């Protein structure tokens, strides 16, 4: 899960970011709720305001997949 968040969600290729966010949404359903709410969501929220648009897009896509 860490690799998806820190590498694939910020990838330069839009399709890689979208597939990574879908995978993150699936994996998050199988993780402890505490990890998701205390670690994953805060890190994605922080990335959602990043100056680089690819990072913002990946973070927002990841957040959307988790809360979907």
Image (tube, grey):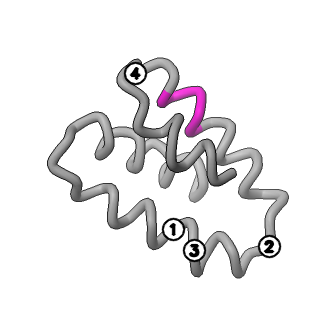
Label disc, if present, on residue 41 of the rendered structure: 1
Residue ID at (76%, 49%): 27
Q: Earlier in the sequence, mark 2 or mark 3?
A: 2
Mark toward the start of the polypeptide (2 vs 4)? 4
Q: Quadrant of residue 21?
A: top right
Magenta region: which residues?
17-21
Residue drawn 58% across and 81% down?
38
Q: Residue 25 location, x and y as percent?
A: 66, 47
Label 2's element?
A: loop
Residue under the image location 41 percent in, 38 percent down: 10
Marks 4 and 3, how far apart at CA = 24 Å
Work out whether mark 1 precedes mark 2 in sequence or the reverse, and give the earlier one: 2
19 lies above or below 65: above
Q: Quadrant of residue 47?
A: bottom left
Check disc 4: other Cα within 10 Å, few if <14, some if 14-19, many if 20+: some
Q: Is residue 57 positioned above or below 41 on the image?
A: above
For the residues bearing labels 4 and 3, Cβ distance under 8 angstroms: no
In the picture of the structure, the residue carrying the numbered disc 3 is: 39
Label 1 CA crowd tier, 10 Å (few <14, some 14–19, many 20+): some
Q: Which residue is mark 2?
A: 32
């Amino acid at each position: 899960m860490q690799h998806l968040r820190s590498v694939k969600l910020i990838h330069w290729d839009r399709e890689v970011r979208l597939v990574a966010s879908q995978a993150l949404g699936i994996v998050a359903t199988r993780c402890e709720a505490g990890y998701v709410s205390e670690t994953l969501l805060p890190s994605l929220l922080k990335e959602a305001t990043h100056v680089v648009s690819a990072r913002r897009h990946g973070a927002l896509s990841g957040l959307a997949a988790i809360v979907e």
